Amino acid sequence: MAKVNRLFSGVMILLALAFYLMSNALSEDAAKWPQFFAIILIILSIGLIVDTFIKPNREQVEKEEKEEKEEKEEKEEKEEKEEKEEKEEKEEKPAKDRSVLYTIILTFVYLILMDFIGFLILTPIYVFVLLWVINYRNTTRLVALSISATIVITVIFQFLLNVPIPQGILDNLF
Amino acid sequence: MDMWLTAVGTVFSMSTLLLILAGTIFGIIMGCLPGMSSTMAVSIIIPFTFTMDPATGIILLAAIYCSSVYGGSISAILLNTPGTPAGAATVLDGYKMTQKGESGKALGISAIASAIGGIISAIILSTTAPFLAEQALRFGAPEYFAVAIFGISVISSLSGVNPFKGLLAGTLGILIATVGMDPVNGYPRFTFSEPHLAGGISLVPLLIGLFSVSQAFVLIKESVNSKEETKILSVSGKILPTGKEFTRLMPNIFRSSIIGTFIGIIPGIGGDPAAFMAYNEAMRWSKHPEKFGTGIMDGIVAPEASNNAVTGGAMIPLLTLGIPGNTVTAILIGGLLIHGLRPGPMLFQENGDVVYSLFLSLIVSNLLFLIIGLACTRYFTAILKVPGIILGPIILILSFVGSYAIHNNYFDIWIALAFGLIGYLFRLIKVPVTPIVLAVILGPLAEQSFRQAMLQSGDEVSIFFTRPISAVFLVIAFITFVTPFVRSYLGKKKESSSING
């Protein structure tokens, strides 16, 4: 966790500096508030780095205490530990569980194409591919699910609620 | 009185009742599916309410909130896993009753206790809130600043194990909220000449991103990892308690409801501690405290009455002062803002019909989930069999369509995805996201009222301390802010002395 915390603090400091410097271009009135909080963000980030340095096990130790208290949290605990182990594994050899990474990439592609192709055509394909990629391999159910989800959402938004959905090339369908 | 009559007209129309029914069913389903929470259920539905009239929209969101908190008890009882965090205390006796073959009765009494808790808190809400709002009408800029600071100070108790991370998240939220027009002069800040950013980062896509999109990623990750099938016990035994049992449980239900309502009023605590607190109190008052944890009804009614009572309690600071006390009420603010309603004392003046319809609808939706809960108990196991893996993708598409629909705008979809990624990453590195939302909502209010107060006083900061109400709120804010630190310090001291001694 120590490494992660340092990285997180670093990113926050950069972000705060960006806010601070960009504020210089604003009028004095408008700049004060963001600059004040940019400085606080930097102070807190430095605080987190120092704190992680002094007490590198803060988050683990307190978690173990809780573990004793409740049986239930033990389960979550295990999951968290697994997650952590996985993450450590990831740092060493970036293989293993890539489901979320694939989901994110697919979602990017989906959203970029949605502007042109539209929700109605693209969504069944997206749901199908996504479920396939994350290892759901019951083809009949996959097809049924991807198509029915699209239809249900379209009907609810477009017709029941009169909220437009992105239509893309089927621009004048509804 | 007029307001109540209007409210009766709004709530008891066929379309509104059907909508409350739909919301209640949806809420129960979302509540009882592990991995789905009240926060997600409410945030994903906000876009659906956009074209409804304001009263109907907020009624639907409130119905989902109440019923999803109740729904959490179903999986607590049947699966030994709470569907929502607030259901964690219900697991203790709920699952034991299931193992004893009394799951029917456990589910029945949990529905009854939840509904009574919700109704008692709704009554307290509707009797005290109008009075409090009237007092708050006299607030000027310094008071609003103090109230906003009080709302933000809650962040320290939401920070979990590492206070730095919570405070960092909160400060980040304040900075995120500065994107857009400066609240006093309308001067554009950090907009990069991007027209979509001129009005600031839209709140609802941000909420959907942080709570729905990121949760969908988590669900996908978990469902891929967990290969084991959860074993679901079927519902067995009688559902209704006998009259005698019910009379015996009544004081416990009543006490827990009051505890829940008061915990709900205090910003920053929320449903899960309220449930455990009521459980402990029930044990303390009981003649047989040793039986708690072995599967008795007392151990179910206490947390359930209490966590549902939080719903009404939490709406008191929300509606009267505009302070969200927990994540769900922060999201409800998003639901009000898309209709141009800013919660606070003026809401009672200008949109009294909305407020009173909400009060009445809370009672109706609590009754509705009671009826559904008792009548459909035997079908709950079917909901729990829905494979988690299909939920992730569906939540994702709903989130994106919803984000688009609010302003008919692609830019908002990207905001939802961006905050989805931030939320997911923050979860991995254990940074809480609720402080971001509180700060995004209260930051602009704090800045605006601070600057107005400064104009008013000619840059004299003392104005915040010489006006009594603002001084009191600032003191409460300070106490709220430091309490978690003091408590953890004292806790450690006690621990080390007990080890040494």
Image (cartoon, rainbow, N blue to C red):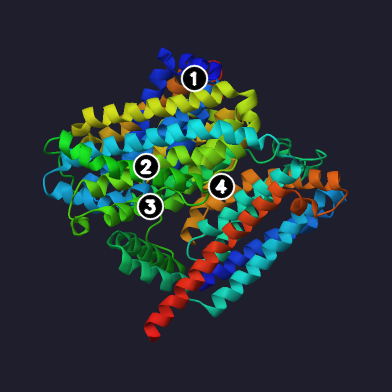
Closest to the observer: B52 or B154? B154
Q: Secondary structure at mark 4?
A: helix
Residue B150 in the image: state x and y as whole percent.
62, 51
Circle 1 crowding by C-alpha within 10 Å: few under 14, some 14–19, many from 20: some
Circle 3 crowding by C-alpha within 10 Å: few under 14, some 14–19, many from 20: many
Q: Mark 3 against mark 2, which lies toward the viewer?
A: 2
Separation of disc 3 and disc 2 at Cα?
Answer: 37 Å
Residue A64 in the image: state x and y as whole percent.
37, 71
Q: Quadrant of the C terminus of chain B?
A: bottom left
Residue matched to label 1: A161
Closest to the observer: A42 or A3? A42
Residue matched to label 2: B257
Q: Secondary structure at mark 1?
A: loop
Separation of disc 3 and disc 4 at Cα?
Answer: 18 Å
- Disc 3 or 4, which lies upstream in sequence? 3
Do we see residue B242 in this rendering?
yes
Q: Is residue A147 above or below residue B275?
A: above
Separation of disc 1 and disc 4 at Cα?
Answer: 26 Å
Residue matched to label 4: B419
Residue B478 in the image: state x and y as whole percent.
63, 59
Residue matched to label 3: B221
Q: Is residue A84 above or below residue B381?
A: below
Q: Secondary structure at mark 2?
A: helix
Q: Is residue A143 above or below residue B83?
A: above
Disc 3, disc 2: CB below 8 Å? no
Amino acid marked by disc 3: Lys
Amino acid marked by disc 2: Ser
